[in-house]
Image: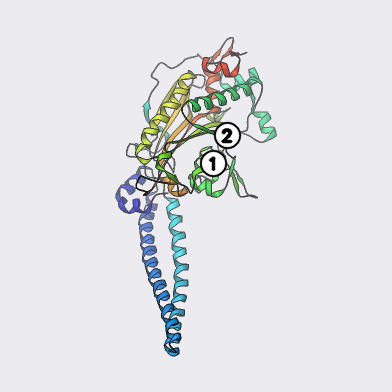
């Protein structure tokens, strides 16, 4: 959620940024409405403060008048105080309505994009930040997609998953299950080497947590909702891990806070059809290791660079061809200020598959969560929050199976062999 002071001080820049994010032209009036409601809130609060102060002063005078036997004057003041209290009660009710309307509008405003975010309407307009080059693997026309390899080597079964749960819930077995476990442990060990504390968070979160990181109300339709308990299955470990410090005032010396966690993730992908979503390309449940950082505002973009380097190192160790995209305004998320996507090349499908998003949210999430810190002068500021996939497993598995297929079987990258305890799937 954008800070009211920021909106007031940067109105024109915000309007430009919202246009970069393809915020609907007819909704830009929300910015003016926010400022208008905030003016009403301030004015009404000032009036209420004055009325309360007057009521308190008159109440003291009434006591003095009664003590000196001036009953008539005391009664007159009592009547005035009674009128003031009626006005205060009505004013407080109006103030609460204004605050609720103001928050509703603030929740509808996306984050201000970083100046480096390129314009554009969709993923086709994303900017290639770093490219593997033209020397992409070519396995020929005989290369099999991962869903055929899975059947051949009995690695995962989408039909059985559909029988048990529904479409989009894969069931891994044998060496497919061992490959999943190996990747999870490999990614967690690499995160630990990079200084991240491992967290095992809850897989269901309450509404406050989902709102705090920006999933609600923006992505409500993509989340599984356990309505009887009003809890949401997590779409990513970002949600519970970032919320660890919700409502806290940190000390500046605690930075950087570096956390990571492995969780299953759950996302409703309604209306997904076609070859591009076959197999593991798009599923409702997938495993992912998430890295989260809470940073001093002056150091968050250096932290973002470190996170990009970490994710890049994982793909290099897995020997997967990759590229990095800077997302355009039309593809960046509602809550993010700047996002980089990592894609790996599928030699069998001959297309790029997204495996990670790494984002800086600046103060957008921390303002929703009331996550602040005190500087050396004890002044309070909003922290910056960042997160990234390191990595999401489903498409990593797809890429590993497809790119490493040989006539003899599927070769496991050397960095992963100590975790799988086998060198080839055959």
Q: CA distance from mark 1 to mark 2?
A: 10 Å
Q: Identify the secondary structure beneath mark 1.
A: helix
| Label 1 Cα crowd, 10 Å radius (few <14 / some 14-19 / many 20+) | many
Image spot of residue 100 (x, y percent): 47, 59
**Residue sitting at 53 percent across and 49 percent down?**
208
Image spot of residue 147 (x, y percent): 59, 23
Q: Nearer the viewer, residue 48 or 332?
A: 48
Q: Nearer the viewer, residue 165 or 386?
A: 386
**Residue sitting at 57 percent across and 28 percent down?**
280
| Label 2 Cα crowd, 10 Å radius (few <14 / some 14-19 / many 20+) | many
Image spot of residue 188 (x, y percent): 53, 27
226 relative to 421, above or below: below
193 relative to 211, above or below: above
Q: Identify the secondary structure beneath mark 2.
A: strand
Image spot of residue 139 (x, y percent): 50, 14
106 relative to 260, above or below: below
Which quarter of the figure is the C terminus placed in?
Answer: top right
Which residue, as the protein is rendered here, is positioned at the far front? 67
> Can residue 98 be seen at all in this image of the molecule?
yes
Residues at circles 1 and 2 in contact by the CB criterion of under 8 Å: yes
Location of residue 56 by image quarter? bottom left
Left or right: residue 315 versus residue 38 is right
Q: Nearer the viewer, residue 242 or 166?
A: 242
Left or right: residue 326 versus residue 266 is left
Location of residue 358 by image quarter? top left
Q: Nearer the viewer, residue 120 or 44?
A: 44
**Residue sitting at 53 percent across and 46 percent down?**
209
77 relative to 88, above or below: below
Image color mode: rainbow
Residue 263 has which mark?
2
User: Circle 1 is placed at which residue position?
Assistant: 240
């Amino acid at each position: 959620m954008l800070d009211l002071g920021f909106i007031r001080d940067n109105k024109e820049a915000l309007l430009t940024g919202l246009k970069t994010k393809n915020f609907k032209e007819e909704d830009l009036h929300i910015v003016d409405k926010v400022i208008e409601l905030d003016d009403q809130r301030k004015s009404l609060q000032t009036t209420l403060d004055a009325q309360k102060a007057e009521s308190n002063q008159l109440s003291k005078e009434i006591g003095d008048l009664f003590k000196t036997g001036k009953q008539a004057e005391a009664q007159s003041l009592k009547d005035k105080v009674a009128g003031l209290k009626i006005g205060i009660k009505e004013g407080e009710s109006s103030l609460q309505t204004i605050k609720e309307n103001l928050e509703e509008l603030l929740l509808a405003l996306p984050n201000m994009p970083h100046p480096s975010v390129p314009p554009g309407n969709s993923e086709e307009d994303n900017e290639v930040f770093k490219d593997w080059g033209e020397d992409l693997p070519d396995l020929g026309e005989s290369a099999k997609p991962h869903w055929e390899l899975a059947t051949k080597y009995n690695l995962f079964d989408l039909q059985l998953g559909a029988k048990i749960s529904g479409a989009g819930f894969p069931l891994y077995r044998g060496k497919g299950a061992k490959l999943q476990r190996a990747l999870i442990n490999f990614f967690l060990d690499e995160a630990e080497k990079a200084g991240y504390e491992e967290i095992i968070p809850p897989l269901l979160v309450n509404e406050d947590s989902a709102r705090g990181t920006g999933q609600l109300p923006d992505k409500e339709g993509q989340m599984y909702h356990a309505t009887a308990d009003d809890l949401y299955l997590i779409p990513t470990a970002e949600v519970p891990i970032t919320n660890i410090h919700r409502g806290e005032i940190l000390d500046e010396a605690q930075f950087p806070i570096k956390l990571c966690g492995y969780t299953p993730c759950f996302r409703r992908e309604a209306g997904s059809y076609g070859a591009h979503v076959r197999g593991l390309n798009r599923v409702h449940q997938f495993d992912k290791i998430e890295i989260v950082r809470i940073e001093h505002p002056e150091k968050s973009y250096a932290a973002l660079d470190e996170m990009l380097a970490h994710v890049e190192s994982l793909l290099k160790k897995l020997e997967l061809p990759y590229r990095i995209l800077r997302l355009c305004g039309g593809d960046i998320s509602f809550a993010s200020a700047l996002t980089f996507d990592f894609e790996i090349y599928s030699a069998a499908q001959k297309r790029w598959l997204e495996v990670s998003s790494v984002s800086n949210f600046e103060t957008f999430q921390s303002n929703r969560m009331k996550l602040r810190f005190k500087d050396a002068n004890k002044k309070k500021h909003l922290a910056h929050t960042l997160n990234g996939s390191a990595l999401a497993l489903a498409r990593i598995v797809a890429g590993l199976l497809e790119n490493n297929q040989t006539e003899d079987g599927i070769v496991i990258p050397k960095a992963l062999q100590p975790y799988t305890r086998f060198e080839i799937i055959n």
